[in-house]
Image (tube, rainbow, N blue to C red):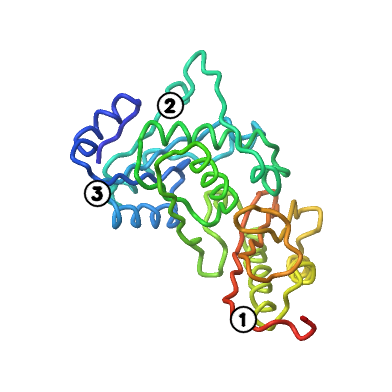
Amino acid sequence: MIVARTVLELREALLAARTGNKRIGLVATMGAFHSGHLHLMATAREECDVTVVSLFVNPTQFGNAADLAAYPRDDARDQELASTAGVDLLFAPSVQEMYPAGFNAVVEVGGVTEPLEGKARGLAHFRGVTTVVTKLFNIVQPHVGYFGQKDAQQVAVIRQLARDLNIPIEIMVCSTMRESDGLAMSSRNTRLSADARAQAVALFEALHTVQSLVALGERLTADLLANARARLSARGIADADVEYFSAVNNHTLKDISEIADEPVLFSMAVRVGGVRLIDNIVIDLPPSAPRPLNAP
């Protein structure tokens, strides 16, 4: 595996692949690799000739300096895991390499950045995401970008970014990888105390509640969300710790009041033991799915 620290090193390392018309896949990460990241890498390896993984903790998407400082970092471990996973090229630039002196540009996507994470964390968060992702797309020039479903809003934002700016890239979304008890894998999980870790399974249980009620015929999202929130409460998670729990269109992120013929994203951000966790599911009913008894 080649490790590139600068843009020039990366472009030189990819020159042969690019001139040889090889299919290049990019997995953009902030490190602290877990099985979810490794699944993305494995998928990229299966579908592409060359797999590039970026490892960069992007400071511009953190609104809280303490959160940035607490973000887990272990470059040596991540490098070893990427190499074992068969990654061809690891791009691990410094902050100065990505944001050199005089850097003064931002990339902003409207609409899909405003609700959910945008409302909870501020629009500067997604300005940081879209700016760094645009830079990575320009630096690597991959044919395919691989992202995880756990960051569902980020996926919607990046899809809009690529579409609006005519970036020639295919966005592939891989399913959320989970622990044996259902908790979505995340680098933040390492910051949970033993008690908070046990409590955190409530997020998966709440989403499972939504799935179960939909299977029984419930279609009103207000009722689904109320039952799911009750599941969080039963695990001792206070309403004040739920930053949002919403039902929105999976593409536009506009609020949905009733599940019908469009995919609905049930998405949440919850603080458990002081650690901010996100999770989601998408409900996409087939046309033949049963309607509730009171439906016209």
> Pointer 3: what residue?
49
Disc number placed over residue 181 in the picture, else none: none
Sort mark 1 into few (<14), some (14-19) or many (20+) by Cα contacts within 10 Å: few
Horizontally, residue 257 falls left or right of residue 94, namely right
Q: Nearer the viewer, mark 2 or mark 3?
A: 3
Say how many tags the image has: 3
The crowd level at tag 3 (other Cα within 10 Å; few <14, some 14-19, many 20+) is some
Distance between the alpha carbons at the discs numbered 1 and 2: 51 Å
Q: Which residue in the structure is indicated by mark 2?
A: 94
Of labels 1 and 2, the one closer to you: 1
In the displayed structure image, the side of residue 29 where residue 198 appears, left or right? right
Residue at screen point 35% across, 26% down: 7
The amino acid type found where label 1 is placed reads Ala
Mark 2 vs mark 3, CA separation in Å = 27 Å
Say which mark, if any, is on residue 289: 1
Q: Position of residue 121 (x, y in %)?
A: 69, 40
Q: Position of residue 260 (x, y in %)?
A: 67, 71
Q: Going from the N terminus, do you reach mark 1 or mark 2 first?
A: 2
